[in-house]
Image (tube, rainbow, N blue to C red):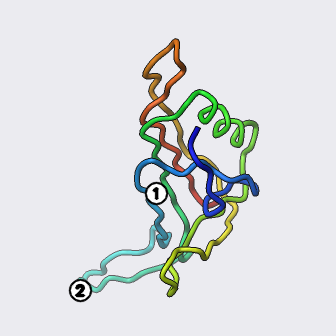
Amino acid sequence: MLRRTSLLQIDGQPLPEPTETADIRFQDIESDDSGADEMGVYHREVLRFGVLSCTLTYGYLTNEDCAYLLGLLQNKTTFQFTCPVASSAADVTQTIARTCYCANYGAALQRLKAGVWRDMELQIQEC
C-alpha cells in the first residue's frame, strides 16, 4: 500500500502519495467576450480568477489503494479537495481547500489475478 499524505485530501481523508508529479494549476476563466479588437488590443473579461485544477497520477496501485481512492469519490458530485500551495517555507506545508469535482479518472489493470493497477489518473476541477 502507498503511504498517505495530509497534503492531499478529499473530504478530510488523506490520499495516497502520487507516484508521479502532482500537477496543480490555477487558471483564470474568461468570458466569450474576451479577445482582440480590430486594433489588435486584447481585452480580458475575467469571470473567475485562480480556478484550481489538479491531476494526480499513480504509476501503480494495489487493488486496496485503488478501491480506497474510488471509494472517496463514490456517489459524490462535489467534495472538499485539499492540496498544497507554494509558500515561502523551505517545505511545502501550506494547503488550501476548495469545493471540487472529479472530471475524469481511470486506470489500467496490469495483472488481473494480483489486482495491480497502473497509470491511474484523477483529474480534479474546482466548481
The quadrant of the picture occupied by the N terminus is top right
**Residue 41: x percent and y percent?**
28, 86
Choose the circle earlier in sequence order: 1 or 2: 1
**Residue 69: x percent and y percent?**
64, 40
Residue depicted at 59% across the width and 33% down the height: 66
Q: Quadrant of residue 33?
A: bottom left
Q: Quadrant of residue 48?
A: bottom right
Q: Secondary structure at mark 2?
A: loop
Specify the amino acid type for callout 1.
Ala
User: Of the residues tagged 1 and 2, which is closer to the observer?
Assistant: 1
Q: Is residue 45 left or right of residue 43?
A: right
- Residue 30 visible? The answer is no
Residues packed near mark 2 inside 10 Å, few (<14), some (14 to 19) or many (20 plus): few
Look at mark 2 in the image and give the residue it sits on: 39
Look at mark 1 in the image and give the residue it sits on: 22
Residue 25 vertical position relative to residue 5 in the rendered view, above or below: below
**Residue 32: x percent and y percent?**
45, 67
Residue depicted at 41% across the width and 75% down the height: 34
Q: Do the numbered discs 1 and 2 sit on residues whose CB atoms are within 8 Å?
A: no
- Specify the label residue 88 is tagged with: none
Q: Is residue 33 left or right of residue 1?
A: left
Q: Is residue 78 left or right of residue 102?
A: right
Specify the amino acid type for callout 2.
Met
Residue depicted at 61% across the width and 63% down the height: 7
Q: Secondary structure at mark 1?
A: loop
Q: Quadrant of residue 73?
A: top right
In this view, the residue in front, 90 or 50, is 90
Seen from this angle, which residue lies furthest top? 113
